[in-house]
Image (cartoon, rainbow, N blue to C red):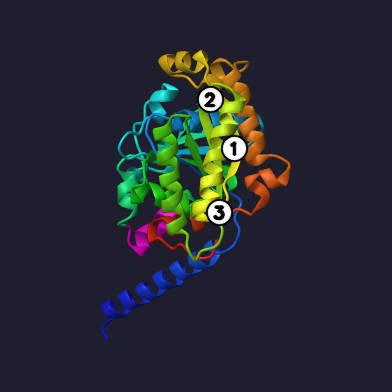
Amino acid sequence: MNKNAAALSDQAKELRRIVEQYRQESRRTGNLRTVTILSGKGGVGKSNLSVNLACALAEKGKKIVLLDADLGLANIDMLCGVTAKYNLAHLIDGSKALDEVLIELERNVWILPGGSGIKELADLDEARLVALIESLSVLEDRADILLIDTGAGIHRGVLTFAVAADTAVLITTPEPTSIRDAYGVLKVLKKSTEGGGKKDIAFVVNMASSEGEGLEVANRLRMAASQFLNLSINYVGCILKDHFVEQAVRIRKPFYQLYPDSPAAECIRNLVHGLFGVPAERSVNSKPSRGLKAFFFRLTRGRFAER
C-alpha cells in the first residue's frame, strides 16, 4: 500500500471512529430539548405560536433557538420584522459560521433560518453531518430549547422533524377541516413511531372563542386518538381569538412583545406552564431531553429507534 492510500485509509478509519462516537453520544441525554411545532392544515397560526412561545419562554429565563424549517413558506423572519441574509445551507457548505447565520430577535431568543438547507439535510453524508453537528454543538451550552417551526401537512419532511424531536406540539383550530387534518397527522405519527415506544405529543387549540370551545375540540380529538389509534395526546391549552394578534402580524412584531396584557399573551403564558412547567404529568419535561446530537442524527437518518 502506497503512502497516499495509507493516508486515505487512516482518514476513513478516523471518520468512522468519529461518527460512531457521535452516535454513541446521541443515545445519551443532552442539555438541549427539541420541540417541533406542526399542524395538519396551513393557516392555523403555527408560526405565530412558535415565535410567541419563544418570547414567553425567554421571559422565564430560558434561552431559545427557533429553527424555521418550513421549506415551502418560511415566514418566521417576516412575522418578526427581520431579514435573514443567511440560512442553514451556509452552515452546511461551511461558508458561514453559526453566529453569522443566527438572528437575535430579543434577549435569549435567536432565529436559525432553515431555507434550502432543510432540503440538503436529507442528503448529507457522514462527514458533512459530523461537521454540521460540530458547528451546531455550541447550542448545547448556549440554549435550553430548540423550537422547530415546520411546514403544514403530512409530508415526510414535516413528520421527520416531529419524530426526531423530544416533543411534538400539534396545533389546530376549531374548524372541522383543521381538526380532520390534525387527526391525519396523528395517524401518520402513530405509524412512524410504531415499534419505537411512546411519543410525547402535546396538543394546542388556536383561535378558540372560549376556553370551553378549546376543551371541547381537544376532547373530540383525544377521544378519537385514543379509540382508533390507541394514542394518548396531552392537551396543554388554547389560544383565544384576539384582535391584538392580527394587529401584531400587520406591524410584524410578536404580539407577546407588543401586547403583553392581551388575552392571547395570557394564553401563551398558560401554554408555557402546561408545556414546560409543573405539575410534571402535564409537562414535556417529565422525560429527559436527548440533546442536539440525537436530534440531528435521527433527523437525517430516519433512525426511529427506542425513544
Residue 104, image x and y in percent?
49, 30
- Crowdedness near tag 2: few (<14), some (14–19) or many (≥20) residues, C-alpha within 10 Å: many
Left of 75 or right of it: where is 261? right
Hey, what amino acid is under mark 2? Answer: Ala
Q: Nearer the viewer, residue 29 or 153?
A: 153
What numbered label is drawn on residue 208? 2
The CA distance from mark 2 to mark 1 is 29 Å
Residue under label 1: 63
Hey, what amino acid is under mark 3? Answer: Gly
The CA distance from mark 1 to mark 3 is 14 Å
- Crowdedness near tag 1: few (<14), some (14–19) or many (≥20) residues, C-alpha within 10 Å: many
Residue under label 3: 291
Magenta stretch contains residue 132: yes
Disc 3 element: helix
Q: Nearer the viewer, residue 28 or 213?
A: 213
Give the extent of the magenta segment.
124-135
- Crowdedness near tag 3: few (<14), some (14–19) or many (≥20) residues, C-alpha within 10 Å: many
Magenta stretch contains residue 130: yes
Looking at the rendering, which quadrant does residue 212 occupy?
top right
Q: Going 36% across and 42% down the picture, which residue do you hit?
A: 153
Q: How many marks?
A: 3
Quick one: label 1 or label 3, which is nearer the N terminus? 1
- Answer whether residue 201 is visible to the viewer in this image: yes
